[in-house]
Image: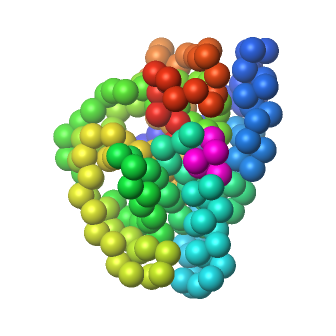
Amino acid sequence: MPTTTTPIPLDVPPALREAWERHQAIVKLGDPILQQVARPVPRFDAELRTLVERMAIIMDEAHGLGLAAPQIGVSLRVLIYKVEETLRVLVNPKIISMRGEQLDPPEGCLSIPGLQGRVRRAMEVRVKGFDARGKPVSRRATDLEARVIQHEIDHLDGVLFIDRADPETLEWVFGPGEDDDGNAAPRE
Ligand code: NI
């Protein structure tokens, strides 16, 4: 089991402070909600669909690959992600099985702007959950999609990628800009 002890406060490099101020809707490391276990969604109602729509807008604005509800301050088991242009929603997700292993690419997180690190993840996961209308969803995912799902479900359990990353590989990355779709690690 990973430790959930997060090294706070992180010594954020001055050049990245502006990135931490950007996208105010996204909760950053240091907010205790990121280390809480989120509650299951009790009802598939209009409020849930509004939450999912809001998450999709915020994720797009921040050029993220994935986003979990606690990252916008809502402690519910909801995640979204967009891998290969398809937006997917998982409510109350459960990983049914995991296979294999992957080490790359390094991970980043919208809640920890600029930090990257290498995290060992399963290469393939089978996940079950519901869409925003309560319809059961079952999905087999591999590679990057599997990585994103594992990263986001970790958020629902109060676990951050820095809790799982090989500490030797954690590094600050100064890209040409947070909003650049360059070669930065996936931000989730
Ligand atoms: Ni994240």
The answer to whether residue 95 is above or below residue 146 is below
Q: What's the residue at 28%, 69% (across, down)? A: 138
State the image coordinates of residue 124 (x, y, percent, origin top left).
23, 47
State the image coordinates of residue 86 (x, y, percent, origin top left).
38, 55
Q: Magenta part of the protein: which range?
A: 58-62
State the image coordinates of residue 55 (x, y, percent, origin top left).
61, 58
The answer to whether residue 108 is above or below residue 80 is above
The answer to whether residue 17 is above or below residue 84 is above
Q: What's the residue at 48%, 15% (across, down)? A: 168
On the question of residue 31 being in view, the answer is no
Q: Would you say residue 103 sits in the magenta stretch?
A: no
| Screen quadrant of the N terminus | top left
Magenta stretch secondary structure, dominant = helix
Q: Could you tell whether 81 is left or right of 55 in the image?
A: left
Q: Would you say residue 60 sits in the magenta stretch?
A: yes
On the question of residue 13 being in view, the answer is yes
In-front residue for pair 148/11: 148
Q: What's the residue at 44%, 50% (across, down)? A: 82
* Color scheme of the displayed model: rainbow
**Which quarter of the figure has residue 13?**
top right
Q: What's the residue at 35%, 78% (across, down)? A: 136
